[in-house]
Image: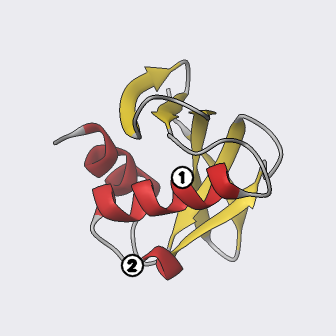
């Protein structure tokens, strides 16, 4: 079961399922083929998306500028790319503490 989609230019994207307005920001685990995240920010004016990028960057160990949202800006299902890392490595880092 592969949990990535090709996004172009040889990059691979990781699927995320995001729950905004949670009590705290955290990686919950898997939700079907997506990594499930909760973020404390509300889904207003892109604040939840910013929180997702910050959480991913922190957990993966890269700068926020290296994480890009490529699909799902206004949806719970999102696709992200982390520059310089494979999708498998991103998932592994997100799901381990």
10 Å neighbourhood of mark 2: few (<14), some, or many (≥20)?
some
Res. 90 image quadrant: bottom left
Residue 44 place in picture, x, y as percent: 77, 48
Residue 40 place in picture, x, y as percent: 50, 40
- Above or below residue 69? Residue 48 is above
Front residue (pair 84, 36): 36
Q: Residue drawn at (58%, 39%), measured in percent from left and top?
A: 16
- Above or below residue 86? Residue 43 is above
Residue 79 place in picture, x, y as percent: 66, 50
- Number of residue marks: 2
> Mark 2 falls on what kind of element?
loop
| Quadrant including the C terminus | top left
- Position of 81 with respect to 28 (left or right) is right
Q: Sequence-wise, which precedes: disc 2 or disc 1?
A: 1
- Residue denoted by label 2: 63
> Mark 1 falls on what kind of element?
helix
Question: In whole angstroms, how far apart are the C-alphas of marks 2 and 1?
Answer: 13 Å
Res. 50 image quadrant: bottom right
Residue 68 place in picture, x, y as percent: 61, 69
Q: Residue drawn at (48%, 35%), measured in percent from left and top?
A: 37
- Residue denoted by label 1: 52
Q: Residue drawn at (60%, 35%), measured in percent from left and top?
A: 18
Res. 27 image quadrant: top left
- Above or below residue 43? Residue 29 is above
10 Å neighbourhood of mark 1: few (<14), some, or many (≥20)?
many
- Asked if the residue at tag 1 contacts the one at tag 2, i.e. Cβ–Cβ closer than 8 Å, the answer is no
């Amino acid at each position: 079961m592969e949990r990535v989609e090709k996004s172009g230019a040889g990059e691979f994207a990781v699927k995320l399922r995001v729950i905004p307005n949670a009590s705290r920001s955290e990686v919950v685990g898997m939700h079907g083929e997506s990594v499930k995240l909760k973020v404390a920010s509300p889904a207003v004016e892109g604040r939840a998306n910013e929180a997702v990028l910050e959480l991913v960057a922190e957990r993966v160990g890269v700068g926020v500028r290296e994480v890009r949202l490529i699909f799902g800006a206004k949806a719970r299902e999102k696709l992200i790319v982390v520059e310089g890392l494979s999708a498998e490595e991103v998932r592994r880092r997100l799901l381990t503490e």
